[in-house]
Amino acid sequence: MILMYTDGLVERRGSDLDTDTARLLDVAERLARAGIAPAHDGLERYAQDVVREMAGPDQSDDATLLVVRCLHSETDGQEAEQIES
């Protein structure tokens, strides 16, 4: 799984960027371990949950997260699924 995000997801006024980036990795990993439904809407809910947990009350910038997951198929190689939140 690949996560790509805009700076608004991790940058906060008066906060350390490295700390907030590490927090994003922790949140993303914890939620992934909790399980992501294999259906398309499962990945969408995962992305929304990550953004929801990262956004705080002082969120002033837009926050975008793109999640890409590769699905392996025995019949047609690989296909990629992506969701923006």
Image (cartoon, rainbow, N blue to C red):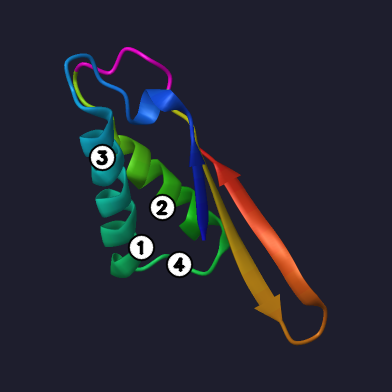
Residue placed at 32% from the left, 50% from the top? 25
The numbered mark, 2 or 1, whose residue comes first in the sequence reads: 1
Amino acid at the residue labelled 2: Tyr
Residue that carries the numbered disc 2 in the rendered image: 46
Label 4 – label 2 distance at C-alpha: 9 Å
The numbered mark, 4 or 1, whose residue comes first in the sequence reads: 1
Label 3 – label 1 distance at C-alpha: 13 Å
The answer to whether the residues at label 2 and label 1 have Cβ atoms under 8 Å apart is yes
Residue that carries the numbered disc 1 in the rendered image: 32
Q: Which mark is residue 58?
A: none
The answer to whether the residues at label 3 and label 1 have Cβ atoms under 8 Å apart is no
Q: Is residue 70 left or right of residue 14?
A: right
Q: Nearer the viewer, residue 37 or 31?
A: 31
Q: Could you say which quadrant of the image residue 69 lies in?
A: bottom right
Residue that carries the numbered disc 4 in the rendered image: 37
Nearer the observer, disc 3 or disc 4?
3
Q: Is residue 43 left or right of residue 18?
A: right
Q: Element under label 1?
A: helix
Amino acid at the residue labelled 3: Glu
**Number of dots carrying numbers:** 4
Residue that carries the numbered disc 3 in the rendered image: 53
3 in magenta: no
**Residue segment shown in magenta:** 58-62
Mark 4 neighbour density, 10 Å: few (under 14) some (14–19) many (20 or more): few
